[in-house]
Image (cartoon, grey):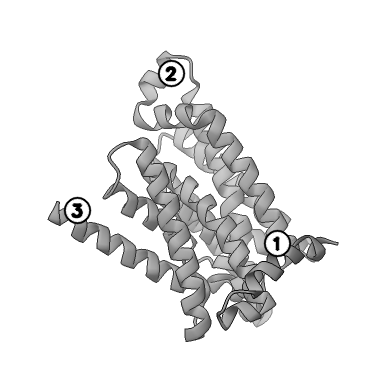
């Protein structure tokens, strides 16, 4: 049923005069890239502006503990345990930062060190850790129609929230004091965004990989800051760089037989270096 929904997409892309377009897995992967790239790009604007790079890194690396909990609970699909644990980690970081008198980076480092170690200890019992290493590099080419549908729903939710709450998030990022004075509930907005970020990062991990997911959040936004003159341009350039790097990385990885997520990161890094050259020349 789900696969039939994508029949028009397969028909349209297969008509392209490229070798990669003849393969069904590449056509689905391209659709996934077109969905996940603007999604991560949009989130990356707030991550970079709000200096949350370390937090998103912690969410990715703590995925091992979510997987471990899924194994202990006997779940066939660890995604739900990963999402649940990512949300718990988000709340734990918030609690340590507000109640424990710790700075944000110290609170994140403390929680991440414990959770990552716990996950590795559980998964390595009996020497069976190797079966979970595929989460480190991800596999975009193994994406299914169901996975693409999940990405589409996530994309709709994220962009709907951005449409209604972007100004509030931006104000909370630039000046929490002003946001509080205007009754904008800066803390609630930041917590809601952190939870949303945790869910999206966790859902994308199986396809992009733990080792590179954070780079796909940061690099397009970092490149966009070298090009943008205002907030609207910052958002637009971030999404554009993310999508272009995603498409180029997918195609290059097909011909080079390399990991798709890591290849996309290298392309995004190339875009960032080009923006540095342009910024220096202007």
Label 2 – label 3 distance at C-alpha:
35 Å
Front disc: 1 or 3: 3
Labels 2 and 3 touching (C-beta < 8 A): no
Q: Residues within 10 Å of mark 3 (few under 14, many from 20)?
A: few
C-alpha span from label 2 to label 1: 39 Å
Residue 229, position in %: x, y?
Answer: 27, 39
Question: Residue 124: in sight, yes or no?
Answer: no
Looking at the rendered structure, the secondary structure element under dot 2 is helix
- Residue 107 in percent (x, y) is at 44, 44
Residue 50, compared with residue 31, is above or below; it is above
Q: Residues within 10 Å of mark 1 (few under 14, many from 20)?
A: some
- Left or right: residue 232 versus residue 258 is left
- The dot on residue 147 is 1
* Residue corresponding to mark 2: 180
Left or right of residue 128: residue 102: left
Q: CA distance from mark 1 to mark 3?
A: 38 Å
Q: Nearer the viewer, residue 111 or 140?
A: 140
The reply to whether the C-beta atoms of the residues labelled 1 and 3 are less than 8 Å apart is: no
Residue at x 65%, y 58% (from the top left corner): 66
Residue 91 image position (x, y, % from top left): 57, 40
In the picture as drawn, the residue positioned furthest to the right comes out as: 1
Q: Residues within 10 Å of mark 2 (few under 14, many from 20)?
A: some
Answer yes or no: is residue 260 visible: yes
Q: Which mark is residue 279?
A: 3
Total number of numbered discs in the rendering: 3
Q: Nearer the viewer, residue 34 or 141?
A: 34
Q: Determine the residue positioned at 26% across, 63% down.
A: 273
Instruction: Say which label, 2 or 3, has the lower sequence index.
Output: 2
User: Mark 3 falls on what kind of element?
Assistant: helix
Q: For residue 207, which quarter of the picture?
A: bottom right
Of circles 2 and 3, which is in front? 3
């Amino acid at each position: 049923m789900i696969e039939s929904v994508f029949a028009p997409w397969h028909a349209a892309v297969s008509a392209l005069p490229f070798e990669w377009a003849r393969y069904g897995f590449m056509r689905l992967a391209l659709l996934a890239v077109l969905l996940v790239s603007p999604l991560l790009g949009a989130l990356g604007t707030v991550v970079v502006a709000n200096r949350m790079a370390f937090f998103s890194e912690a969410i990715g690396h703590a995925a091992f503990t979510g997987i471990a909990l899924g194994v202990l609970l006997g779940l066939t699909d660890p995604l739900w345990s990963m999402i649940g644990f990512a949300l718990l980690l988000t709340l734990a970081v918030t609690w340590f930062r507000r109640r424990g008198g710790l700075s944000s980076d110290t609170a994140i480092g403390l929680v991440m060190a414990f959770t990552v170690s716990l996950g590795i200890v559980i998964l390595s019992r009996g020497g069976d850790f190797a079966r979970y290493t595929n989460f480190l590099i991800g596999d975009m080419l193994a994406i299914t129609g169901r996975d693409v549908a999940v990405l589409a729903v996530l994309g709709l939710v994220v962009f709907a929230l951005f449409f209604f709450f972007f100004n509030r998030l931006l104000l909370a990022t630039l000046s929490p004091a002003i946001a509080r004075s205007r009754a904008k509930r800066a803390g609630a907005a930041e917590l809601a965004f952190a939870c949303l970020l945790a869910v999206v990062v966790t859902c994308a991990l199986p396809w992009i990989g733990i080792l590179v997911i954070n780079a796909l959040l940061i690099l397009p936004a970092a490149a966009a800051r070298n090009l943008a003159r205002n907030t609207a341009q910052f958002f637009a350039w971030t999404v554009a760089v993310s999508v272009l790097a995603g498409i180029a990385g997918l195609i290059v990885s097909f011909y080079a037989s390399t990991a798709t997520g890591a290849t996309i990161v290298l392309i995004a890094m190339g875009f960032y270096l080009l923006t540095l050259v342009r910024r220096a020349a202007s």
